[in-house]
């Protein structure tokens, strides 16, 4: 089941990104390896409350001129209304109600989704009074908050948790869920059609009754698959700019539902920033990933072309060194059947369990071969490791200094686990737990 999406809308400077950061919280820095992803991120999975959700800041980061403002607000709200499950509409309690706020409130009233009216920058009791004119919007309730000073945030979250659907425990079924994501026009729908075309000859797809259905079940070599087709595939005819905006949100939804994510890249365009965002999200969501470089037929190639492209991908996506790369053509069908073979391989690793004794053998060797750097002047001691989950493989490591493990050491351990066990195509998670 995919996580619900909460979208933050509002004028520039009302405090959207402050609220975003407040709710997402500080994360362990993996920034070095994720250029472009963390710098201008405007979506994140929020895991720290009872019901996880995806938070989207629809604001964008480019400054806008006065006359562009209303138009941008309309687009933002439109996007939020179509894509989100819940909307946080942020206004500025210090500046008071503005015409743009009224306009957006008017749009939001028509939407059949929960809207939270948030009056921000109410940093203390004294300011509460200033917020009363917001009731002239004709709303029944609002939250006065201070994103910066963490005021009113707990109440907000409590109310949010009350309305978000509580997801049932993950069904451990045997269907491999494949999400196909990528920018508009990279060839996702061509690829999906080709893939199903091929598989149809060997298997037995029960495609949706109309081309509009998002999910396609099919069987191949007696294994069952679900192809999750990104909704954006069906949004033909929109402007490229709009499509680009939609495509990130669409991709998030698909990624959340998938086990294996096919990150489709257009060979003609090389790697773009949007590709990095999508891939970064797949990584953070802990999904198995495969790079599918499409339109390989359209390129003038020489002996070094594959090598060069592989280098580009490895440089741009340093955090996904484990993801296989396949070069395909949806038009000629070249290597398209190989996609399912790769999916099977990475799925096996994604769901893989290693025994505690094998794990601890490798773990002990690794920690003895290289000691962790001191943490606050204290020696870091490790006790043992255990695998607590799969999809992706997740390990708990007991230590005297759970907060003090340097990121580079975490990466070192992860690399040793990979050398020993493989885990091709899948991220692995290490969690450090305290024990004196
Ligand atoms: P955005 O453009 O809507 O994303 O707004 P930002 O989050 O960038 O915030 C705009 C400005 O308002 C920044 O200078 C913030 O420090 C400030 N700000 C945000 N939240 C609060 C708050 O709760 N109280 C006060 N006093 N200032 C805030
Ligand atoms: P989507 O928006 O990602 O679903 O992309 P489409 O599948 O609609 O493809 C966009 C355009 O790229 C269409 O004109 C396709 O014919 C073309 N296209 C897709 N795959 C290939 C390919 O492998 N080679 C070439 N040369 N063109 C392709």
Image (spheres, grey):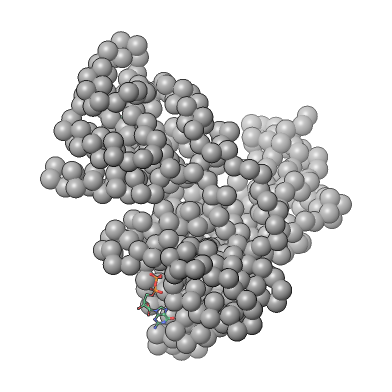
**Residue at horizontal 40 percent and vertical 72 percent from the top:** 186
Q: Is residue 167 visible?
A: yes
The quarter of the picture where residue 187 lies is bottom left
Q: Nearer the viewer, residue 168 or 294?
A: 168
* Quadrant in the picture for the C terminus: top right
Percent x, y of residue 378: 70, 32
Q: Is residue 21 left or right of residue 240?
A: right
**Residue at horizontal 39 percent and vertical 65 percent from the top:** 234
Kindly give the residue lying farthest to the right in the view shown: 357
Q: Nearer the viewer, residue 120 or 396?
A: 120
**Residue at horizontal 71 percent and vertical 74 percent from the top:** 222
298 in relation to 96, above or below: below
306 in relation to 38, above or below: below
Kindly give the residue lying farthest to the front in the view shown: 209
Q: Is residue 18 left or right of residue 352?
A: left
Q: Is residue 361 visible?
A: no
């Amino acid at each position: 089941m995919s996580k619900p999406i909460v979208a933050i809308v509002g004028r520039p400077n009302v405090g959207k990104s402050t609220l975003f950061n407040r709710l997402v919280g500080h994360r362990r820095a993996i920034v070095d390896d994720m250029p472009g992803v963390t710098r201008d991120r405007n979506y994140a999975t929020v895991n720290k409350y009872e019901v996880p959700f995806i938070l989207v800041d629809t604001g964008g980061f480019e400054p806008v001129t006065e006359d562009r403002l209303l138009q941008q607000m309309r687009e933002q709200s439109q996007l939020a209304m179509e894509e989100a499950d819940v909307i946080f509409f942020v206004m500025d309690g210090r500046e008071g109600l503005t015409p743009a706020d009224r306009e957006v409130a008017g749009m939001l009233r028509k939407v059949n989704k929960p809207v939270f009216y948030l009056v921000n920058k109410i940093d203390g009791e004294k300011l509460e009074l200033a917020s009363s004119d917001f009731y002239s919007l004709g709303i029944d309730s609002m939250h006065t908050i201070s994103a910066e000073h963490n005021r009113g945030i707990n109440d907000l979250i409590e109310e949010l948790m009350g309305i978000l659907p509580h997801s049932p425990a993950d069904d451990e079924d045997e269907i491999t869920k494949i999400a196909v994501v990528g920018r508009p026009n990279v060839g996702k729908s061509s690829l999906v059609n080709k893939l199903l075309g091929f598989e149809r000859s060997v298997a037995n797809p029960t495609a949706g009754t109309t081309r509009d259905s998002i999910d396609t079940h099919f069987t191949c070599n007696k294994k069952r698959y679900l192809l999750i087709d990104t909704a954006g595939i069906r949004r033909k005819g929109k402007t490229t700019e709009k499509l680009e905006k939609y495509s990130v949100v669409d991709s998030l939804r698909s990624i959340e539902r998938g086990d294996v994510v096919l990150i489709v890249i257009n060979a003609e365009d090389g790697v773009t920033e949007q590709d990095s965002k999508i891939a970064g999200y797949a990584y953070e969501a802990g999904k198995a990933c495969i790079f599918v470089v499409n339109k390989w037929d359209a390129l003038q190639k020489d002996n070094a072309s594959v090598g060069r492209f592989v280098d580009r991908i490895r440089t741009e996506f340093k955090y996904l060194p484990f993801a296989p790369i396949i070069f395909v053509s949806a038009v000629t069908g070249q290597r398209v059947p190989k996609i399912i073979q790769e999916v099977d391989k990475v799925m096996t690793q994604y769901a893989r369990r290693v025994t505690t004794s094998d794990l601890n053998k490798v773990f002990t060797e690794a920690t003895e071969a290289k000691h962790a750097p001191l943490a606050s002047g204290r020696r870091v001691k490790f006790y043992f490791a255990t695998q607590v989950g799969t999809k992706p493989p997740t390990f708990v490591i007991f230590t005297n200094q759970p907060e003090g493990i340097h990121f580079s050491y975490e990466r070192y351990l992860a690399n040793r686990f990979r050398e020993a066990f493989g885990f091709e195509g899948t991220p692995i998670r290490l969690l450090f737990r305290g024990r004196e």
